[in-house]
Amino acid sequence: MSRPSRAFLLSATALAGIASAASANPAPERDYLGSEIVVSGVAEGYVSQDGSTGTKTPTPLIDVPQAVTVITEDQIEDQGLQSLNAALRYVPGVSLGTGEGHRDQVLVRGQPSTADFFIDGLRDDAQYYRPLYNVERIEVLKGANALIFGRGGGGGAINRVSKQADPMELAGELSASADSYGAFALAGDVNAPMGAALAGRLNATYEEFANHRDVYEGRFIGVSPTATAELGMNTRLTLSYTYDDDDRVVDRGIPSLGGLPLEGHDKTFFGDRDFNHSTNVAHIARARLSHQFSQGLSANATVQYADYDKYYGNIVPGATNGTTVSLSGYESATDRENLIGQANLVAEFDTGSIGHTLLFGVEAMDQQTGSTRNQARFGGANSVSVPLGRKISVPAFTISPQNATDADLSVFSAYVQEQLDFGLVQLVGGVRYERFDLETTNLVSGVPGGRTDERWNPRIGVIVKPAEAISLYASYSESFLPQAGDQFSILTPAQELLQPELFHNYELGAKWLIRPELMLTGAVFRLDRENTQAPDPANPGFVVLTGATRVEGFEASLAGTLLPKFDVNLAYTYLDGEVRRTTSAAPAGRRLQQLPAHQVGAWGRYQLTDAFALGAGVVHQSKQYATLSHAVVLPAYTRVDAAAYYDVTPALTLQLNVENLFDQRYFASAHGDNNLQPGQPVTARVGARLRF
């Protein structure tokens, strides 16, 4: 039996089992239905009390022993956010990489990743820009936690909760917006009940891109239908499909000079107008069946299939001396298929005065990836120097084949978690077993690669409840990352010998639900990373696992309705991270890359009258190093945003968002020392939203 068949069989068996039980074992109706967890007291606005993603059980966020930042649907609308990258700028503890101009790339608590992204708790690990047109909220769960998310996620995980069809409501929304550079977006969201137990929902969007850079354009098409069927009082089937089609210019930013971003070239495009572009077509289909067997016993099973067809080509700026600039380039294509099956059983019961919430789960994933990479050649050389000017002239080049690989990844996990409630004290503990089996082939050399890693990753937390609305917690959790990296496209002979990287997260925190619509949180943490690769000085061409880093910090946030008619999401993070062992890459004691010591993300909306409201926000980051070389600094910056809202009628709202109100020059992301992305100057976006 093929590996994809095994993953499908696992999920199909679980789905069939739940469906069979649904007809044979009716039970009283209950709010918790697996993927649709309704936590009592969840408020609208800027606060969420749903902590189910952090435990895979119906747990209020206040009782999850982990720092979590939530960007709600209301905040997404108020800020006019259309991409995941734009939303994460307001999350302290998260820094953004440029992603080579074609993908989401983040650093969470100092740990870089292109793969720790999830949809409704299921992995979405391809390299692309993720839209928000079909997203209800964004959850940033910080700290290593392989028990819930599996391998990777050393600094944390980013989960998008998707919009689902609702059998109880007929509603729709149409929106349109355009900004001062000519970018625009059209979107629609329609939910329609089709009987007492069936509903369909359709989200769709069309966007065109533009910004302040000399050469930047593109378009995005997204269509996402969903259906929800109530198969009896206690069983729910949710089906969804997403088609995302992205085509845009690849912009690698500008180089550095004298340790700072190059002056006078914030609009200059250091690429080739015809060659620098990327395309991605993603198909993601998912089926989830949830059933409540009895008042304290529920189960859910999910099958997700995803296909990603990605291409990008780019000419890349290198070092400049102020007179000339080095250029190089390449193109890359990736075709990836993911098949994921996951099943969970949740039991809630009491033994005497002790409450139990017990989770058993299994997950299987099969991934097939084919990738190619071709080098741009300038008259036989891999790079060329050209005059530095307001416009860059790229010499003629040819494309030469460089790499081609096939990768076959099979992952199986089983996990158990127990939540004990003693009243004053709660305990959370569990462990996940994961078998990670990767086989690759270098299609150019014919050299195969293969390695199997097996890990047990624990998590434990202690929560003290001096009052129902207050939680004080201490937690420890682990994760691991195989040495093939985030994307697992190739495993070299040297990497076959290496144990995975390990992450250890220690955290103390407090959460206070001041009111059902207002939550205050704070946490101090330490995140240790070990087994990082470094060149072997005794064996050129080989690596050793002598690298280690540590990040320590503090974060605090206040989210919700601070005063009547005044909603806020305010957050601050302090980060201090360093290399702990000297290697040829960096000496011990050197500060980690893209790790600003201070980060502030603050947004608020005040309802002045029944029809008119104002919004304002601040993003601040202290200076940071672009790479471990410490050769280039991204200066500190403070960006101020503003917004205004006017309800023309109860159904029609006009909205104005102004980004970078005071036209601050800033650089919030980098990819190496010479791909620095200028932030956008003052930009106004006007929009209209019609609800019906």
Image (cartoon, grey):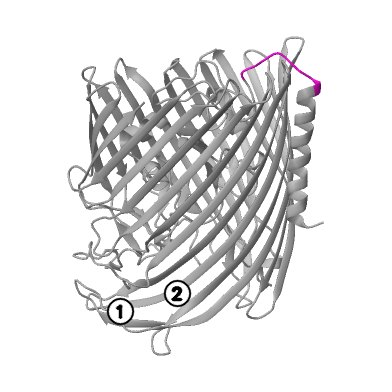
**Which one is nearer the viewer's eye here, 340 or 262?**
340
| 664 relative to 44, above or below | below
Question: Which of the 4 image quarters holds residue 323?
Answer: bottom left
**Can you name the residue that lies furthest to the front here?**
195
Name the residue carrying label 1. Answer: 394
Question: Which of the 4 image quarters holds residue 561?
Answer: top left
Quadrant assignment for the C terminus:
top left
| 288 relative to 482, above or below | above
Q: Residue sitting at 65 percent across and 71 percent down? A: 492
**Which one is nearer the viewer's eye here, 275 or 590?**
275
Mark 2 is on which residue type? Tyr
- Residue 547 is inside the magenta segment: no
Name the residue carrying label 2. Answer: 330
Looking at the rendering, the stretch of residues picked out in magenta corresponds to 24-31
Q: Residue sitting at 63 percent across and 77 percent down? A: 539
Q: Earlier in the sequence, mark 2 or mark 1?
A: 2
Q: Look at the numbered disc 2 and give the secondary structure of its residue.
A: strand
Q: Position of residue 619 (x, y in %)?
A: 30, 41
Q: Position of residue 390 (x, y in %)?
A: 19, 71
Instruction: For residue 155, say whether it is visible.
Output: no
Q: Position of residue 598 (x, y in %)?
A: 35, 42
Mark 1 is on which residue type? Val
Q: Position of residue 298 (x, y in %)?
A: 71, 24
Quadrant assignment for the N terminus:
bottom right
Q: What secondary structure is the stretch in magenta mostly built from? A: loop
Estimate the spatial distance between the alpha carbons at disc 2 and disc 1, rounded to whole Å.
14 Å
